[in-house]
Image (cartoon, rainbow, N blue to C red):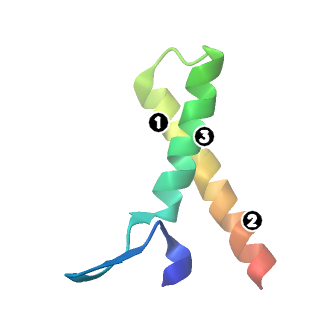
């Protein structure tokens, strides 16, 4: 389970899993794309960001096996 989340924490309320790693990867891809100024449609950019995230998750899982 720990490999599925970014930034897990433990608080006085117990463990919190944090943000899903796929969402974090998508956010990072989106930031990069928005920084270069070529994204013109928010929905398209979000879909592409998750496509990058899915590819990153797939490669990450292949390397673990």
Expressed as whole percent of the image width and height from the top left, the position of residue 43 reads: 41, 29
Residue closest to the eye, 17 or 46:
17
Circle nearer the N terminus (2, 3)? 3
Total marks placed: 3
| Above or below for 2 versus 51 | below
Residue visible at 56% across and 23% down in the picture: 34
Q: Is residue 50 something that shows in the picture?
A: no
In the image, residue 47 lies at what x, y percent? Answer: 49, 39
Question: Who's the residue at 46% across and 19% down the image?
Answer: 41
Q: Identify residue for label 1.
A: 46
Q: Nearer the viewer, mark 3 or mark 1?
A: 3
Residue 46 to residue 40: above or below: below
Q: CA distance from mark 2 to mark 3?
A: 15 Å
Q: Residues within 10 Å of mark 1 (few under 14, many from 20)?
A: some
Answer whether labels 2 and 3 touch (C-beta < 8 Å).
no
Q: Viewed as shown, does residue 11 lie left or right of 41?
A: left
Position of 62 with respect to 24 (left or right) is right
**Label 3 crowd (10 A; few <14 / some 14-19 / many >=20):** many
- The residue located at (51%, 81%) in the rendering is 2
Q: Quadrant of residue 65?
A: bottom right
Q: Which residue is mark 3?
A: 29
Numbered circle sitting on residue 59: 2
Residue 8's place in the image compared with 28, above or below, is below
Cα separation, mark 3 vs mark 1, equals 9 Å
Place of residue 13 in the rendered image (x, y in percent of width and height, measured from the top left): 19, 81
Farthest front residue in view:
12
């Amino acid at each position: 389970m720990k490999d599925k989340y970014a930034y897990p924490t433990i608080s006085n309320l117990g463990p919190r899993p944090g943000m899903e790693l796929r969402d974090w990867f998508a956010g990072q891809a989106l930031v990069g794309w928005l920084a270069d100024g070529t994204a013109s449609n928010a929905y398209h950019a979000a879909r592409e960001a998750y496509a990058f995230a899915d590819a990153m998750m797939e490669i990450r899982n292949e390397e673990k096996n």
